[in-house]
Amino acid sequence: MRFLHTSDWHLGRIFHGLHMTDDQAIVLEELIALVKESNVDAVLIAGDIYDRAVPPTQAVTLLDEVLRRLVQEAGKNVIMIAGNHDNADRLGFGQSLLSQNKLYITGPVSPSTQPVVLYDTYGPVYFAPLTYGEPLAASELLRQPLKTHEDVVRWQISNQLRQIPDTARKVALAHVFLTGAQESPDSERPLAIGGATTVGIDCFAPFNYAALGHLHACQNGSSKVRYSGSLLKYSFNEVQQSKGVHIVDMAADGSITVETVQLKPCRELACLRGSFSELVSKPQPELYDCYLQVTLTDEQPILDAKYRLEQVYPNILHLEYARLHSGNDADTAAVNHKKLGTAELFEAFFTQVNNRQLTDSEKSLLSDIINSEVQTERQA
């Protein structure tokens, strides 16, 4: 059995104001070509198909076209589960009908979920779809005392294994945060605020391979428990990451070999740092086509900095000043804004932006302006 493992497409993603649907369509075209060339039997998509519960129309249209080409045009089986960004009920619409046409979608956690069985020369391979489920909702639905994400995963595994022969070859699809795995800050939405969200790798011991989703970095829990990582880089913290898919070959005895194939995006992400004058006078042509985060080291704000830099680097998505993000200066330390009066709040803002305190005359002027506004409001 030969299959391709991917996850975390996040269709409909908006990244620093940029709608990424066109970029996603380009890299998915590359994925479709890879599926055809590599002669896989199935494509596994381990959750976070969409970026949000109610995706934009363009994202739905893109997914529809990609699935049509994978199933009808390429003739491949597609097995897909919901992630924490997806609305499981919406994603799972029509799943019983679609499963008759090589498209196997698992929406919400359900006691009626069955393994997907595909056949090769050596017999059946059972694919266990361990879809994402909130512990509270799953506990109420299943009438089971499920308090953690691991509880939900273990219950689903138990439910699946009851339907699979002990000696059969088995593959799990799961959308989980594996204990000890590496997160990508600012890219992955936490599975929960508080509570136990991680899942132990021993959960997947019964399987010959576990195709995981949720974490955006391509990484391994073990040789047979792997994250494919996200389709594209969705955070500037992911600049150094490579994005791609796993192609897995499973032998008659269930042993596997894995090949990781990188995907080439339309534009790379890159970070650029320096003073405004340096960046303008010493351009880097290799970054012209990249989506950029620019960090200026100037002490004072530069007028129209982003617009002027865009004449050199046309794809700047984010611009910031290093001194406002260093976190070392006591004057720029975080404050509890709710406890500040109007004058104190403005003074804190002024200090952060201008890197100096208000003078006595400026404080007096500020006080006069605030008092005048208060009097005007009272008389209104």
Image (cartoon, rainbow, N blue to C red):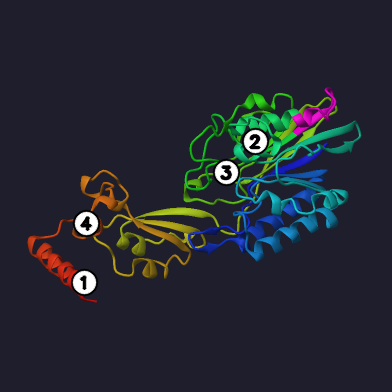
Q: Secondary structure at mark 2?
A: helix
Residue 216: numbered disc:
3
Name the image quarter holding the N terminus.
top right
C-alpha span from label 3 to label 2: 28 Å
Q: Secondary structure at mark 1?
A: helix
Q: Secondary structure at mark 4?
A: loop
Q: Nearer the viewer, mark 4 or mark 1?
A: 1
* Residue linked to disc 4: 341
Q: What amino acid is found at the position of numbered circle 1 in the picture?
A: Arg
Image height of 288 relative to 35, above or below: below
Q: Is residue 66 visible?
A: yes
* Residue linked to disc 1: 378
| In this picture, residue 299 sits left or right of residue 371 | right
Name the image quarter holding the C terminus.
bottom left
Q: Which residues are magenta?
A: 159-171
| In this picture, residue 137 sits left or right of residue 70 | left
- Find out whether the residues at labels 1 and 2 contact each other: C-beta distance under 8 Å: no
Name the residue: 61% across, 37% down. 135
Which of the two labelled residues, at mark 4 and mark 1, occupies the earlier sequence position? 4
Q: What amino acid is found at the position of numbered circle 3 in the picture?
A: His
Which residue is farthest bottom? 380
| In this picture, residue 219 sits left or right of residue 90 | left
Q: What amino acid is found at the position of numbered circle 4 in the picture?
A: Gly
Which of the two labelled residues, at mark 4 and mark 2, occupies the earlier sequence position? 2
